[in-house]
Image: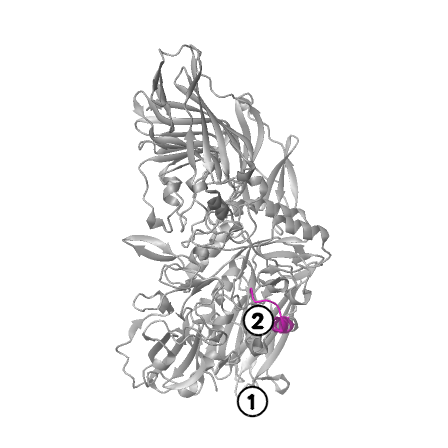
Amino acid sequence: MSHPHWENPETLGFGRLPAGAHFHRYATLQQSQSGRSSRDKALSSGWRFCRVSHPSEAPDQWQTPSFDDTAFKAITLPALWTMDPDFEDQPIYTNVRMPFRQEPPRVPKLNPTGLYRLTIDLKPNRRDRKILVLEGVENCCYVYCNGVEIGFSKDSRLPAEFDLTPYLQTGANVIAIMVMRFSDSSYIEDQDQWWHAGIHRPVRLSTRPNVNFRDLHVRPKIDLATGQGDLNLSIDLAAEGRDALGHQVAITLTEANSQRNLTPHLRGEIEKANYYPVTGKGARIELHQTIKRVKPWSSETPQLYRLTATLLNPAHKILEVIHCNIGFRTIAVENRELLINGKPVLIKGVNRHDHCDQTGKVISEALMRQDLEVMKQHNINAVRTSHYPNSSRFLELCDEYGLYVIDETNLEAHHHYAQLGRDSHWAPAFLSRAVRMVERDKNHACIIAWSLGNETGFGPNQLAMAGWIRGFDPSRPIHNENAICEQGVSRDWDANPEGSDFVCPMYPSVDDLIEHANTSQDPRPVILCEFAHAMGNSGGNLAEYWQAMEQYPGLQGGFIWEWIDHGLRAIHEGQPYWAYGGDFGETIHDLNFVCDGLCWPDRTPHSSLLEYKKVIQPIRVQTLGRHFIISNLHDFVDLSDYQLTTHYLVDGLIKSSQRIVLTTIGPQQSTKLQIGAPAHCKLLPGEHSRLFEFRTKRSTSWCEKGHLVAWDQLHLKTHRKPLPKATPKRLDTPIIRSIANAIQVEAGLLSLSLSDRGLADLQVDGYPLLAQPMDLNIWRAPIDNDGIKGWTGQQHKALDRWREQGLFEAETRHSPAKVLTETASAIQLGQSSIIETQAGNIRCKSEYVLQAGDCLSIKHRFQVPKALEDLPRLGVRYCLSKDLEALSWYGRGPHETYRDRNQSGKLLVHHSTVTDQYVPYILPQDHGNLTDVRWLTLSGETALFKVIAASPIEASASHYSKEQLLPAFHTFDLTPDPYTWLSLDIGQRGVGGASCGPDTLPQYRLGFGTFELSYQLQLKLS
């Protein structure tokens, strides 16, 4: 029994033109120079669309000109019908599982199908051909012209071209496309992303002369010693029979912003010897030119040259002009290093999916540019196109902006893993996807490696892909995570070198990396294909990863998973939010695992992106004795484009600033700088530090003038200031009362009450500061790295352990308070407390010293048993009155920081509000923590509440309690409290990256034993 094309993995497509390089076509040189082409017509408007449940349900003759499509919906392309509320099909999110219960190559009986019709007026002639170009269709499609089936295509992320010429008629013509949501290729497009359906990239009609450019292969080389360029070209022409005889191709190569032709005599003519059997048609020209001096392309110096090829007929009339941008650079893998232009380059990368929160996989050029500009602004130099080829326009922009790219084959069989990579029936699909990707993208300077796909195991099908790529393009290495990973379990990292030129593991620990660097003899560099899973409040341990990358030979960077959260914009009772798996009624889904980016869906950076920017910054300042060492970590540029400003600070306040004129500091070079303390600052009490800031001197394509690229803040000295002491005078007639189980104390303007609920009341001049009693605080609303709230089977995660320990239901019992000492100037109270959990008890002794001068000194001493050695947090929490909204602190900021993610926080005095401390993670979780806090002030129109820590603490102020955050699954589940929840912590557990990867490092956990939290409250009315 035969199966339809969409259930046969050996049917890849038919009626398609051969794959070739992407370039821009024009009728004249003037059009080429202006960028406005008469040869390409965008087919975006005028489409009529209908959705049916299966291909067999398409109306009879729906693809013919006579069919009445008035009942079809008018739409504009590109668009996904899964993002259109008029149709019942919804986005589906899965990470590993298929969205249906079938086995390869079968697809479900319910296979939603889109029917597209476009009526277009054309005037065919014998001199031209009309080519329909579909840049991207999910998942597979049939193409019809005037009722005739002309082709079929699979691979959702690569273009398909169909020659309509034989089927056209003068006047009205109907182009029809049938798109199926699922096919056998769904099994090898099982990536961690939304499942959509529709035409998600542009559709256009390309007009080409009968003899036209079919392909262009540019192989530029550069001699790094002399700067000499070497240009090799292979040009394929499409033509019938011997029609190409006598045609010529002329080449011009110009530098950006210059009209000077570097190849004035580069021209070739088609002769008999030039014929090349490209599918039985066409001809080839091979050209070569040496150029005396060219400038190399790199991410730091994205020097491009515009290559223009002009096709002339035997009468020397221009038939077609094409152009593309090229770059001269070298790539090599030698001695455990990836060398670009002869230098080992650290890959500071991210994985990027196509995603728009309003259009799904439909990505505008403006959004592509925004992605690349935000990346460059955060010191990122590389992109892995996870897990499929991106739009050709995106690659052109990477060439232009300067981003290294690992171009990845549209291949992931995560659910079935290695099964399909070892099945010969699937071999053509594997190989075809690699071949067509390489053919399309071969001329891009930005592409430094080809990837064979993701999470598909390793077998003969991948070896076939690698073999073809190595034979066709030996200039670039091959990346293949699958070579050292089987069903998510890492093999020997030295395995299968024939399948990958890099060792490219997923989510290794820092210790794993260091061990490999110290013990392996593998000559390949380690470049992490995925690390530091950025889900929710994440990005811990980045400093340790990068320290290892810089310190150990053979470790050469990697790609964070991933660039953006894939939330889809939705509305709940008038409130916008970002939806994730399960929010569209899917029965098979993976919740919010799709929200794991360094940015929100609108490209607003998370704090984790700010941390990444800091640890990978290209300039560093360190101290050496009385000198400062400025190191230029760039690979190819000096620091002449940067302005250095240095600030002298005391206790987080800038006391003096000056601009420094930098001497020329070449790439990978350092210089010494000596700057003394300003005379008026030398004896000031407090913490002294110097802040260095490096900003751009001028605007670039990706930033404005004055953009902050790098900074360092170096501690100099401390003239220690003890906690402020109250004026040594007598307390104003203190009053101590014992009422029931409480002790009440009044002295001066302060009064407090200690009861069986702990510190139950605190007032200044009769104004109550507490809305609820202060509580001892040992848990936080879980972050995604603690454990994913909606998942089961996470026994290895901290969240499940905390649940078993009963931390979220822990009860605190307070013993009766006591007056410990009473003098003329102070009253000391004490209270013992026990926090009861299923795993043991935490004991706490609290002391409260009420002093003259309206100061309250507080000390909490905790005893944590070993059974509870990895608490979420340890400290106290105040629920403060409604008025205290203004927030200031001396500590790291201005954004949230955690103990393993605070390199990006400047140690300054910061000013904000409690409201602005809210961080709207798509799945609500703990947020807003502040580290290295010396003091913190909350104030309003009525009162001031100031905390002065005896030693640096962690703190947070929020209108959202942990009790409200804990059960919430969306931002619309939250309502801000009128009160302020102030947490003062000895510490919180670091954020780590354990949602998919290693847990928080031991040094960023709390441990067990004795801990002390000591601080002073200064309270007064405004």
Asked if residue 171 is positioned above or below residue 629 in the image, the reply reads below
What element does badge 2 sit on? helix
Measure the C-alpha gap from mark 2 to mark 1.
46 Å
Q: Is residue 166 magenta?
A: no
Main SS category, magenta section? helix
Residue 422 x/y as whole percent: 60, 73
Residue 873 x/y as whole percent: 48, 38
Answer whether residue 667 is visible to the viewer in this image.
no
Asked if residue 291 is positioned above or below residue 950 in the image, the reply reads below
- To which residue does mark 2 refer? 419
Answer whether residue 136 is visible to the viewer in this image.
yes
- Disc 2 marks a residue whose amino acid type is Gln
Q: In which quarter of the image is residue 506?
A: bottom right
Q: Quadrant of residue 496?
A: bottom right
- How crowded pointer 2 is (Cα within 10 Å; few <14, some 14-19, many 20+) is rated as some
Q: Nearer the viewer, residue 943 or 799?
A: 799
Residue extending furthest toward the left: 70
Q: Quadrant of residue 57?
A: bottom left
What element does badge 1 sit on? loop
Instruction: Determine whether, in the image, residue 764 is placed left or right of residue 384.
Output: left
Task: Tell me the number on the disc at residue 746.
Answer: none
Which is more N-terminal, label 1 or label 2?
Answer: 1
Q: Which of 805 and 934 is in front in this view?
A: 805
Which residue lies at the image location 31% right of the left edge and 65% below the top edge? 85
- To which residue does mark 1 refer? 242
Q: Which of 32 and 527 is in front in this view?
A: 527
Which residue lies at the image location 32% right of the left edge and 53% below the top edge? 576
Do the CB atoms of the residues marked 2 and 1 lie less than 8 Å apart? Answer: no
- Disc 1 marks a residue whose amino acid type is Arg
- Residues drawn in magenta: 454-469
